[in-house]
Amino acid sequence: MKIIRFLKTALIAGALGVFASLPAMAAPLVLGGKNFTEQYVLIEITSQYLRSRGYTVDARTGLGSVLLRSAQENGQVDVTWEYTGTAALVYHKLKEKLSPDAMYQRVKDLDAKQGLVWLNKSPLNNTYALGLPAEAAQKSGIRTISQLADKMKSDPKGTRHVFGMDAEFANRPDGLKPLEATYDLHFSRAETKQMDPGLVYTALHNNQLTIGLVYTTDGRVKGFGIVPLEDDRHFFPPYNATPVVRASVLQQNPKLAEQLNALSGALNNDTMLEMNKQVDIDGKSVQAVASEFLRTHKLP
């Protein structure tokens, strides 16, 4: 009996030793993403990459910016791809105009107090733009938002200018009302249409909108011949995509920062534009596009 008891004790101790020696990264990493194509692609790339490096990953996508931010602050999400302009204006309510580097450093410093670490920002800058249908842009010759504002003022009274946008932009501090103030634009309630972001591109392509809010790295801009207008008064801030990770998660996973920084450095506007196009225009799956990206990029 003593021998059996000794063996049981040894087995339990051994098992406890094995569990104690397991790497911290065995705990699932919860990745959170927003509700548009680029974010689905970024989260899928990140998920596939980290799984290939031995991490257990739980990916949750389709969230609005504020909800995702709250989830990360509350410890429900570990890793996100956030945009510098969104953090500056929406989360921290910054008012001043900042260069891309200064904005990144500011939000990095502010979020450090919340236990959130901004890793290296990528060259990928997915800012907003106002887009016109190809035919309308060609006929009018409008290429800047200022020219659009002048044209709207000179149009006959009663001319409707239907502006399509997602619901988030309609209420953001870098959204509709400040844009109208900056460019002296005026849209009535009936002229503003809140819709799914993806439907804006289709409606512009079908000439169902006069103006649409688009993302500069969305593949449908190129695929549908939409003309993004120059933001000549520099209303829209830079939106460099950056991996943001809870500090405690980085402490538990010593290699994670290096790995995510390498992934961040491999992204740029041209690469993202093509991947978004493959999903939204060519009909490829997000999983296939992510796999191809990882196949063609060497990462640690």
Image (cartoon, rainbow, N blue to C red):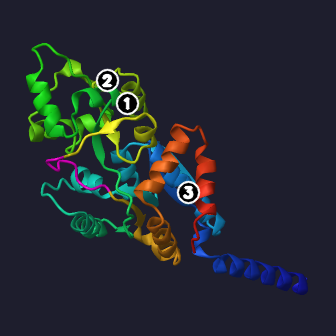
Q: Nearer the viewer, mark 3 or mark 2?
A: 2
- Whether 132 is drawn above or below 2: the answer is above
Q: Amino acid at mark 2?
A: Leu
Of residues 217 and 245, which is closer to you in this image?
Answer: 217
**Residue identifier under label 1:** 200
- Identify residue type, mark 1: Val
Name the foreground residue: 134 vs 104: 134
Which residue is at a point 31% across and 55% down the rendered structure image? 239
Secondary structure at numbered mark 3: helix
Disc 3 or 2, which lies upstream in sequence?
3
Q: CA distance from mark 3 to mark 2?
A: 33 Å
Q: Check if mark 3's residue and mark 2's residue have beta carbons within 8 Å.
A: no
Pointer 3: residues within 10 angstroms few (<14), some, or many (20+)? many
**Numbered tag placed on residue 217 in the rendering:** none
Q: Quadrant of residue 136?
A: top left
Whole-percent x and y of residue 23? 62, 76
Q: Position of residue 169 (x, y in %)?
A: 27, 38
According to the picture, the residue beneath numbered tag 3 turns out to be: 45
Q: Amino acid at mark 3?
A: Ile
Q: Residue at x 51, y 78 (%)?
A: 254
Name the residue carrying label 2: 209
165 w.r.t. 25: above or below: above
Q: Main secondary structure of the magenta part?
A: loop
> Is residue 294 depicted above or below 66 in this figure?
below
Q: Earlier in the sequence, mark 3 or mark 1?
A: 3
Q: Quadrant of the N terminus?
A: bottom right
Q: Position of residue 204 (x, y in %)?
A: 36, 27
Task: Give, as a single range, the part of the protein colored magenta.
Answer: 232-239
Q: Is residue 123 magenta?
A: no
Disc 2: CA contacts within 10 A as few (<14), some (14-19) or many (>=20): many
Tags 1 and 2 touching, CB below 8 Å = yes
